[in-house]
Image (tube, rainbow, N blue to C red):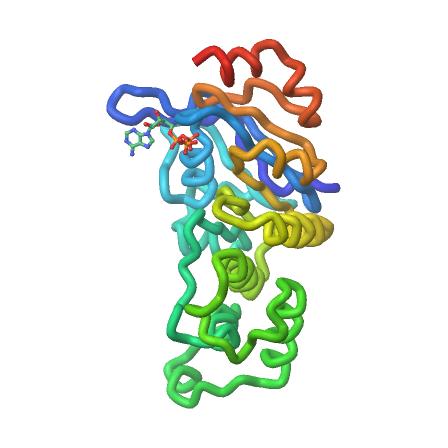
Amino acid sequence: MSTLLEVQGVSVTFDGFRAINNLSFTIGLPEMRAVIGPNGAGKTTFMDIVTGKTRPDSGTVRWGDMGHSLLSMSEAQIAQEGIGRKFQRPTVFEDQSVDDNLRVALKKPRGPLAAIFDKTSDADRARIEEIAAEIGLADHLGDPAGILSHGQKQWLEIGMLLAQDPKLLLVDEPAAGMTTAEREHTTALLKRLAQSHAVVVVEHDMEFVRRLECRVTVLHEGAVLAEGSLDHVMADARVVEVYLGR
Ligand SMILES: Nc1ncnc2c1ncn2[C@@H]1O[C@H](COP(=O)(O)OP(=O)(O)OP(=O)(O)O)[C@@H](O)[C@H]1O
């Protein structure tokens, strides 16, 4: 496993309030990591920093073998580098088919002619089918995304991220609102993806985190409070305090 992302000594202040406080965080490739922490711990702000939406006041964010700084890149450049983010609410194109949703998400140079003639090459076709099989929607390629269940929409959005060939996937509360069967499917999908990607899952649901069977980072007041297996961090008195002491 090599280091893919290294956040070091990062701080962010909003109107005098220090939301991220000297945060350091490293993730390798491949790896699955769960990030947990009470409300306001800084989980969303952490993802905003990695994707370039929020710029830290101090610290470094390095990426890849060459340790390129993400802080000098735009949000679009960071996405291009291979960082994909999935927000909690699915944002698929409801009127378009599953197939079309995946096709528009494919990473490739799109000149004006490609857009006009809308050609799908054999390689694109194969990639769409491969992704649809991976996310469990191979039998739904012709269906409008709007008729999919909540869970299926979430998987489609993960598929749309995969179409961009990311190295790192940031996934915000993937299990929220899912049925038990959908949660199991999601766990299996994320675990498979983590064999060849870095996957960071921000999640409040401890049962879901347990099923991911991965290293857990606990954030509190914008810094890492504890790190290790879920059992390890949950046995830490400081972690118990921040969860139960409020
Ligand atoms: N743009 C902003 N302006 C002012 N304060 C902000 C801003 N963004 C975040 N904060 C504050 O920074 C702190 C960290 O917020 P953040 O959303 O990162 O926490 P979180 O761990 O994702 O919380 P939750 O689990 O509730 O989503 C909070 O106290 C929040 O109110």
Residue 139 location in percent, x, y? 62, 75
Identify which residue is drawn at 60% across, 69% down. Answer: 137
* Residue projecting furthest to the bottom: 117
Q: Residue at x 59, y 31 (%)?
A: 206
- Quadrant field for ligand 1: top left
Q: Is residue 28 above or below residue 11?
A: below
> Which quadrant of the view contains residue 140?
bottom right
Q: Which residue corresponds to the image point at 42% horizontal and 64% vertical from the top-left?
A: 92
Q: Give whichever of 36, 81 is nearer the camera.
A: 36
Task: Tell me the quadrant of the picture where the N terminus can be found.
Answer: top right
Q: Residue furthest front?
A: 180
Q: Position of residue 104 (x, y in %)?
A: 46, 73
Look at the picture and state if 236 lies above or below 45.
above
Query: In the depicted view, which residue is nearer to us: 110 or 20?
Result: 20
Depth check, front residue: 189 or 108: 189
Specify the quadrant that holds the C terminus: top left
| Residue 80 visible here | no
Q: Position of residue 89 (x, y in %)?
A: 41, 51
